[in-house]
Image (cartoon, helix red, strand yellow):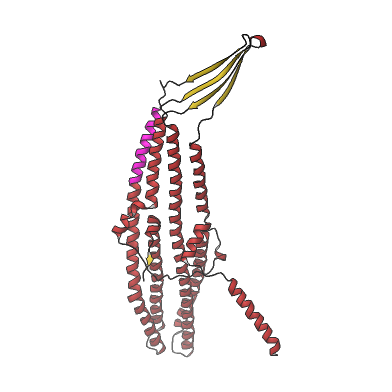
Amino acid sequence: MYKHVLPRLAAWCMASLALAAHAEPALTLAAAHAKVMQHSPALQALGHEVAAQDGLVRQAGALPNPELSGLVEDRQRATRTTTIQLTQPIEMGGKRGARIDVATVERELARAMLDARRAELRARTSIAFHALLAAQARLELADTTLGLARQALSGAAMRVAAGKNSPVDETRARIAASGAEIDLVQARGELDNARETLAALWGGSGAQLAPIAGQLDNLPDSAPLPALLARLPHAPGMARARLELQRRVALGRVESARRMPDLAVTVGSKQDEQFGRRQAVFGLSLPLPLFDRNQGRMAEAAQRTEQARDELAASEAALASELRAAHGRLTVARSQARTLRDDHLPGARSTVEAARKGYEYGKFGILDLFDAQRVLLQAQAQHLRVLADAHGAAADIERILGAQGAVQPQD
């Protein structure tokens, strides 16, 4: 018999090892960040925008094309005059340099927008990752709750059958077990939604998402608020607002340069068939800025520049307010998490244990046990929410400040 079983067992072991070798490793937060940075459709679209701006910079430096023209006078060959000339526009007033400056700043602005989107996606990835960790923990908590509710229901049924408790206790236990089943279904739905939210950041599917590995209870920490505010001038949002101001200033220089009309130089040759001679043709043309001196566009550019200056100040104030709020949320969440971890949860667990023993010895009713379990489960669920809030606030700080605002888990 063993000679038939052993080969099958060996084949099964080899197949298991092969599957383990090809199994996808658990997804960490760092791996999720790398995946989003590499495969995010939004980042790829902004990358194309940066490449497109490179083309606009090259185009801005192009010189005006010359114009070739010909003129034939008279239909009779004997008296015909043929003129061929080449006209080259010459930009005056520094138009080409101003145009290149605008294109260069717009390219840098596209890169700043790409950096800001990277910071935003990193923050969203961190929030989604820790939300998924919290959803997994809530599912485990709901499953444990259902197990406890079923045990309580079984114990209540036995005590009712033995005549030690009222049938009302069994009904209450059955209702509690039904509620726990509903909570478990809801927790599974929340877990599926959290998986889809995380996978969607790199264009993936939650059904194909590998198991994730992380420590939700490692509380993030950050620098003091004054130190964070000192980093604000280097934040992606501030860089983008400053570049927008530079772009408006450069556009103002373009409009100012347009006051100067462009010169056109013409050279050519004129063939006179009647006299049999060829003449050189030279010419200059310069528009006279008598009526249109680009006054309106210059006034508009000046106002747009002031608008961008005010928007820069507004961005700084808004980002500082967001940073203070995120730091405040992180501080409060860290304090709440520590209180729940060190005081509330141990007390609730000891209360449940005492209520369970008292119920087993007939000193407490089933309602006392249910109340103790409900308090513990509420405290555990609140602890998960607070931990997720702490990681969310830390991610907001990272979004505002970019990579320089990254926080590290401390405890």
Q: In this view, does 34 lie to the left or right of 11?
A: left
The answer to if 301 sits in the magenta stretch is: yes
Image quarter where the N terminus lies is bottom right
Could you say where residue 319 lies in the image, as x and y percent from the top left? 35, 52
* Residue 217, x across and y down, in percent: 40, 71
Residue furthest out toward the left: 226
Point out the residue furthest to the front here.
277
Q: Can residue 76 be seen in this view?
A: no
Observer-nearest of 310 and 65? 65
Instruction: Tell me which corner region of the image, top left, top right, bottom left or bottom right, holds residue 390.
Output: bottom left
Residue 48 vs residue 63, the one in the foreground? 63
Depicted 320 relative to depicted 154: above or below: above
* Residue range highlighted in magenta: 291-313
Q: Is 195 drawn above or below residue 245 in the view shown?
A: below
Question: For the C terminus, which image quadrant?
Answer: bottom left
User: Is residue 327 rendered to the left or right of residue 106?
Assistant: left
**Residue at the spot 55% in from the left edge and 17% down from the top edge:** 280
Image location (x, y in percent) of residue 78 = 66, 9
Residue drawn at (67%, 11%) of the image: 77
| Front residue of 107 and 46 | 107
